[in-house]
Amino acid sequence: MRSLICFLIALTTLCAFAQQPFLGVREWTSLRDESSGAAPYENLRYLTGLHRVPATAAFDQAAQFMLQRAHEYGLADAHSEQFPIDGAKRYGLMRSYLAWTVEEARLWEIRPQHLLLGDWKTDPIHLADYSHSADVETELVDVGNGASEADYSGKDLHGKIVLADGVLARVQELAIAQHGAVGIVSDMPNQTTAWSGLDTTVVRWGHLDARQPSGFAFMVSRQTAEALRSHLRSGEHVILNAHVKATVGPGHWTVVTGTIPGTDSAAGEIVYSCHLDHERPGANDNGSGCVTILESARVLAHLIDSGQLPRPKRTLRFVWGPEVEGTMAFLATHPEIKQRLSANIHMDMVGGDPFKNKSVFHVTGTPWSLPSFVTDVAPCFSMQSAPPPANMRRARRRLKRALSKPAQADKARAMN
Ligand SMILES: [Zn+2]
């Protein structure tokens, strides 16, 4: 499905140029007047309080919230579906993994200092996803990156905790499964380009391989990890106390969906998707995408129901689920929707600052084997710097005049 991701525009996006081939000034003005910056912001605030790891109670709480909003906003057939997972069951090409329940988790440095390095209750991001139960007080050993066998040569790791910044699942396999360590303290930068490393006090999220039978990992900031490394380099013993009460086992993925029905049931569906999962307090990736498609749903449902916008020919479907796996499970279970899907608008990290994040916006067409109109349409929306054709320039001028009406100033500010 990701190969079909396109850069069509959500109708609430403030991209005036992009709207013009499809909407008149009156429709565009209605959309602008109904759109709110405040509603998605408030919805986002709620989501960021939840540690939304897939197949956990907090994820289901986020899903329940989206469902409640879908009902409030008037989506048709709004409901949630649960897809069983056990680490073996497959949905399409994807093998399911497991659910995770955490009661408590704390990591203390006992020596040389007495410091609380992480507590699940206040900062769940400190515990890597799919960590297993443990209750140990033991020595910390620096294994460098920890993702290659050479990092372990000559080190006795049995019953110890390793300090590493390599890819977590690989460190888990080598340090825990092969060398007998009990756990990991990690400052793995889960993003090795862009913004990574700019702020050494940030705690990155991490996740272990859910199908591995044991092990835990605590995530710490680069600053904390460097302080531990410096103790070890100077020959001091670092003793940590790790307590984790958690279970990894069968469960379910939850996906919420609802529609704005089109006038022609044979015309197919446009699907708006996102991923609802992320560690707390993640707002941009991807609370922002989820509340943006939710706001698109609210605005479109209201304008269509009140007759301010014509009902579209195709059904618009909105889907909120865990990344990739939820979509795979949903589509594998509903081949009829897959069959009817004309295009998918997937919103991920729409709230990011491309300058701060040093990000680059890529536009990719569908492969030649899967030709689509999307390949032609996407550049129109994304390359705003290209000179528009004459008819678009005229429409743009009309739109500019309409948008500059003083009565709309407050709404426009709210949207910004
Ligand atoms: Zn994302």
Image: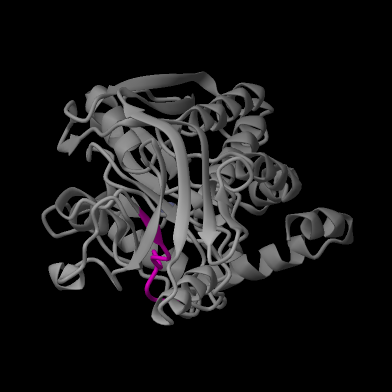
- In terms of secondary structure, what is the magenta stretch mainly? loop
The image shows residue 299 at horizontal and vertical percentages of 64, 38
Q: Is residue 193 magenta?
A: yes
The residue sitting at 65% across, 51% down in the picture is: 28
**Is residue 286 at least partly visible in the picture?**
no
Q: Which residues are magenta?
A: 184-194
**80 shown above or below 204:** above
Q: Kindly give the residue lying farthest to the right in the view shown.
A: 407
**383 shown above or below 185:** below
The total number of labels drawn is 0
Which one is in front, 320 or 113?
A: 113
The residue sitting at 51% across, 20% down in the picture is: 78
**Is residue 396 at least partly visible in the picture?**
yes
Asked whether, in this view, residue 264 is left or right of residue 292, the answer is: left
Which one is in front, 293 or 283?
A: 283
Q: Is residue 185 magenta?
A: yes
The residue sitting at 40% across, 20% down in the picture is: 81
Q: Quadrant of the N terminus?
A: top left
The image shows residue 162 at horizontal and vertical percentages of 33, 61
Which one is in front, 297 or 225?
A: 225
Which one is in front, 115 or 79?
A: 115
Q: Quadrant of the C terminus?
A: bottom right
The image shows residue 118 at horizontal and vertical percentages of 56, 52
Asked whether, in this view, residue 336 is left or right of residue 76, the answer is: left
Quadrant of residue 415 in the image?
bottom right
The residue sitting at 21% across, 62% down in the picture is: 156
